[in-house]
Structure formats: structure tokens, C-alpha cells
């Protein structure tokens, strides 16, 4: 299949929606909470220390914590859906408040 200039611009615009860096902290039930905006992470973190990470590094850290807590891993796309939406990604039997 031949790629046109339009294909390339669509691909770039889709990729630009994925953050390259995220800010996160250990939040609910020792799970990690990540945001694409540093300010939002700091406001939500309360007394927790906020860490700046590359998005894939944050994904690996999140799955490592899930493994340590006995929960199944999530895919990278599922992780991206969790960024800025922390309560969506809390395991079912973990009680959390946003």
C-alpha cells in the first residue's frame, strides 16, 4: 500500500496524542497515579512525592506494582487510558477515592 502525505499527517497527529512524559505518585492502595500535566499531578498528590517519568517507563512501573500486589498486568493502551483517569485503572477489589 502506498502512503500519501495525508497518511503521514494523520499518523503524526495520532501519535502526538500520546504523552512522552508523565508525572505520577504512589496513590490509591499503593498503586501509581499518573497525569500528563505536572501541575495536575502535584495538586492531586497531596503529601505524596511526584515523579517525572517517560511514558513507557511509567507503564513498566505500573505493571511491576500490579504484579507485586497480585493483580494481572494491563496493556500499554490500557495504561494510556489510565493517564489522567486514575480511578478507571484501580483493580476491582481496591477501595479508592479520587
Image (cartoon, rainbow, N blue to C red):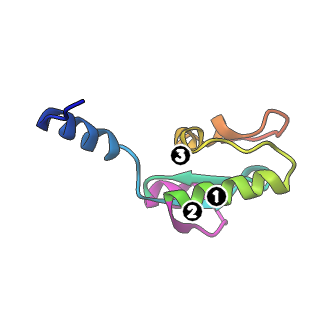
Q: Tell me the crowding category of disc 1: few under 14, some 14 to 19, or many 20 or more residues within 10 angstroms, Cα based.
A: some
Q: Quadrant of residue 94?
A: top right
In the picture, the disc for residue 60 is 1
Relative side of 10 to 50, left or right: left
Tell me which residue sits at (77%, 38%) in the image: 91
Label 1, secondary structure: give it: helix
Q: CA distance from mark 3 to mark 2?
A: 13 Å
- Residue 66 percent across, percent down from the top left: 77, 51
Where residue 15 sits in the image (x, y, percent)? Answer: 34, 45
Marks 1/2 in contact by CB < 8 Å: the verdict is yes
In 3D space, how far apart are the residues under numbered discs 1 and 2 (Cα atoms)?
A: 5 Å
Image mark for residue 22? none
Instruction: Specify whether residue 84 is painted magenta.
Output: no
Dividing the picture into quadrants, the one containing residue 8 is top left
The range drawn in magenta is 38-54
Dot 3: what SS? loop
Q: 67 and 45: which one is in front?
A: 67
Q: Residues within 10 Å of mark 2 (few under 14, many from 20)?
A: few
Q: Is residue 90 left or right of residue 20?
A: right
Check disc 3 and report the residue beneath it.
83
Amino acid at each position: 500500500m502506498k502512503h500519501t502525505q495525508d497518511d503521514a499527517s494523520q499518523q503524526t497527529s495520532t501519535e502526538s496524542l500520546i504523552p512522552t512524559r508523565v508525572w505520577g505518585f504512589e496513590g490509591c492502595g499503593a498503586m501509581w497515579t499518573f497525569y500528563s500535566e505536572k501541575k495536575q499531578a502535584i495538586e492531586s498528590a497531596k503529601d505524596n512525592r511526584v515523579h517525572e517519568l517517560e511514558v513507557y517507563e511509567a507503564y513498566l512501573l505500573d505493571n511491576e506494582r500490579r504484579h507485586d500486589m497480585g493483580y494481572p498486568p494491563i496493556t500499554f493502551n490500557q495504561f494510556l487510558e489510565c493517564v489522567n483517569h486514575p480511578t478507571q485503572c484501580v483493580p476491582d477489589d481496591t477501595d479508592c477515592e479520587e
